[in-house]
Image (cartoon, rainbow, N blue to C red):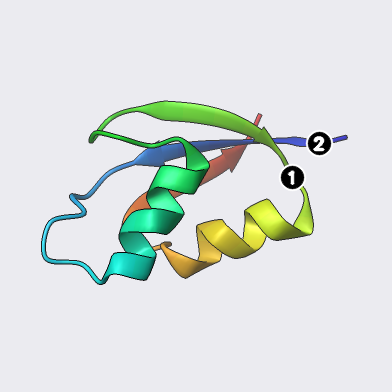
Amino acid sequence: MAKIKVTQIRSSIKRPLNQKRTLEALGLKRIGQVVEHDATPSVIGMVNKVKHLVSSEEA
């Protein structure tokens, strides 16, 4: 299965609770942190939900 690398590039301060929880579910806690996930539809959907806070690339 393909992998996707997700990096948090913006803060979650002053964001709605659902966006904060989405970042937490992706495993992101601080700016600059990088996590790697399988590129499943659910993970891609979570990344799209917070696309203004993260950057993603195929790994």
Q: In the rendered view, would you say 37 is above or below 39?
A: above
Contact flag, marks 2 and 1 (Cβ < 8 Å): yes
What is the total number of numbered labels drawn onto the structure image? 2
Q: Distance between the residues labelled 2 and 1?
A: 5 Å
Instruction: Report the amino acid beneath label 1.
Output: Ala
Q: Which residue lies furthest to the right in this view?
A: 1
Given residues 50 and 58, the one toward you in this image is 50
Q: In which quarter of the image is residue 57?
A: top right
Crowding near pointer 1: few (<14 within 10 Å), some, many (20+)? some
Q: Residue placed at 41% from the left, 62% from the top?
A: 50
Quadrant of the image containing the N terminus: top right
Quadrant of the image containing the C terminus: top right
Q: Is residue 56 left or right of residue 17?
A: right
Disc 2 on helix, strand or loop?
Answer: loop
Q: Residue placed at 40% from the left, 49% from the top?
A: 23
Disc 1 on helix, strand or loop?
Answer: loop
**Where's residue 40, x and y in %?**
78, 50
**Where's residue 44, x and y in %?**
65, 57
Instruction: Report the amino acid beneath label 2.
Output: Ala
Q: Residue placed at 12% from the left, 56% from the top?
A: 13
Disc marking residue 6? none
Given residues 7 and 19, the one toward you in this image is 19
Q: Is tag 2's residue or tag 1's residue first in the polypeptide sequence?
A: 2
Crowding near pointer 2: few (<14 within 10 Å), some, many (20+)? few
Q: Mark 2 points at which residue?
A: 2
Q: Residue placed at 56% from the left, 60% from the top?
A: 46
Let me know if residue 32 appears in the view: yes
Let me know if residue 52 appears in the view: no
